[in-house]
Image (tube, helix red, strand yellow):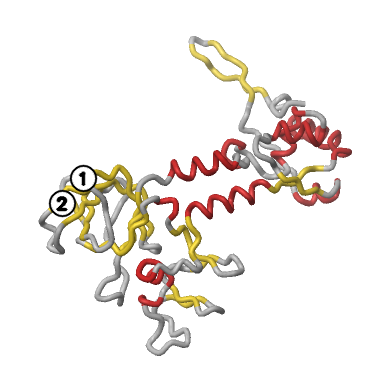
């Protein structure tokens, strides 16, 4: 049975007093976890590159039209985005979606506090020769992502040269609205190799503006057993920017690969209960 075969039919006006019948594709069938457990246990299945819901259904149920069963029991409602892509497609998409450079903001006043300039997507970032922000060098780029906690600005369409550490920069938008001038502390030439987040050995995500003691993570200002409290120059992102310490850093590319691996593991429903699943589907759709 094809997924849409039993969906309700709606009458939709097409103009000139005429109507057409269309399938209500927004109807969803959701089997709750209790019903799944009572009917049978689910088994683990590893998706291979090139597998689709239909091809998996063909392998498991000998019927490729039952791909919808695979999708439903894995809570996948948009196979174009939620189904595992091939490794090559994942790599390509990650690189295509993160072009250009990653610029990391340098701390203020000798590493004593973070800087949070006013930056928005589609701002133009400009390079200057001095901290006065007057003499423009001709180097510019377009901001397509800004993460204040990571102190990270992703830029593409760079022209007039290149950005580098210790550059003086500021962003501009609209009719001359600009941020204060600030300094770049680190440049990653391929943005997808820049840090995406920090995590401990157990996979717990940590705040970039915190210090990791090996046991706990303490945010800036928290005493954390440190006299005077945790300082900015000891936090994760500042160590990454100034000291190139990537011990707990997970890059954009690594994170994409991790998500790729996690999506490859799905659940499949026991074949012997497929007739009951189809019957339940028809019953729900028929009201």
Q: Residues within 10 Å of mark 1 (few under 14, many from 20)?
A: few
Q: Residues within 10 Å of mark 2 (few under 14, many from 20)?
A: few
The residue shown at (37%, 88%) is: 228
Is residue 235 toward the left or the right of residue 83 in the image?
Answer: left
Q: Residue 227, how many percent across, how many down?
A: 40, 90
Quarter of the view holding residue 115: bottom left
**Quarter of the figure with the N terminus:** top right
| Residues at circles 1 and 2 in contact by the CB criterion of under 8 Å | yes
Please tell me whether residue 36 is drawn above or below residue 115 in the rendered image: above
**Helix, strand or loop at mark 2:** strand
**Helix, strand or loop at mark 1:** loop
Please tell me whether residue 111 is drawn above or below residue 52 in the rendered image: below
**Quarter of the figure with the C terminus:** top right
The residue shown at (30%, 42%) is: 157
Q: Residue 51, how many percent across, how many down?
A: 68, 36
Along the viewing direction, whichever of 45 and 50 lies nearer the viewer = 50
Along the viewing direction, whichever of 9 and 128 lies nearer the viewer = 128
What label does residue 137 carry, if any? 2
Along the viewing direction, whichever of 93 and 114 lies nearer the viewer = 93
Of callouts 1 and 2, which one flags the residue occurring earlier in the amino acid sequence?
A: 2
Please tell me whether residue 188 is drawn above or below residue 157 in the rendered image: below
Q: How far, Cα to Cα, is label 1 from label 2?
A: 8 Å
Is residue 215 toward the left or the right of residue 101 in the image?
Answer: right
Q: Residue 79, how many percent across, how many down?
A: 62, 37
What label does residue 84 carry, if any? none
What label does residue 160 carry, if any? 1
């Amino acid at each position: 049975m094809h997924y849409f075969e039993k969906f309700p039919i709606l009458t939709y006006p097409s103009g000139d007093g005429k109507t057409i019948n269309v399938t209500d594709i927004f109807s969803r069938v959701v089997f709750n976890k209790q019903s799944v457990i009572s009917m049978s246990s689910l088994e683990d299945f590893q998706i291979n590159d090139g597998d689709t819901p239909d091809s998996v259904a063909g392998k498991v149920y000998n019927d490729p039209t039952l791909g919808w069963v695979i999708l439903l029991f894995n809570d996948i409602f948009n196979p174009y985005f939620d189904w595992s892509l091939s490794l090559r497609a994942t790599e390509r998409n990650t690189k295509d979606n993160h072009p250009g450079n990653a610029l990391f903001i340098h701390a203020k006043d000798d590493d004593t506090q973070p800087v949070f300039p006013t930056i928005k997507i589609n701002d133009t970032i400009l390079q200057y020769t001095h901290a006065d922000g007057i003499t423009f060098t001709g180097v510019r780029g377009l901001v397509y992502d800004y993460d204040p906690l990571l102190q990270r600005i992703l830029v593409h369409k760079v022209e007039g040269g290149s950005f580098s550490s210790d550059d003086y920069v500021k962003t501009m938008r609209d009719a001359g609205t600009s941020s204060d001038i600030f300094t770049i502390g680190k440049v990653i030439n391929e943005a997808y190799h820049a840090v995406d987040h920090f995590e401990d050995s157990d996979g717990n995500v940590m705040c970039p503006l915190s210090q990791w003691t090996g046991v706990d993570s303490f945010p800036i200002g928290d005493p954390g057993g440190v006299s005077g409290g945790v300082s900015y120059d000891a936090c994760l992102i500042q160590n990454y920017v100034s000291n190139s310490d990537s011990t707990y850093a997970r890059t954009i590319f690594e994170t994409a690969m991790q998500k790729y691996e996690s999506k490859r593991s799905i659940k499949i429903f026991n074949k012997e209960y497929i007739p009951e699943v189809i019957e339940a589907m028809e019953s729900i759709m028929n009201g």
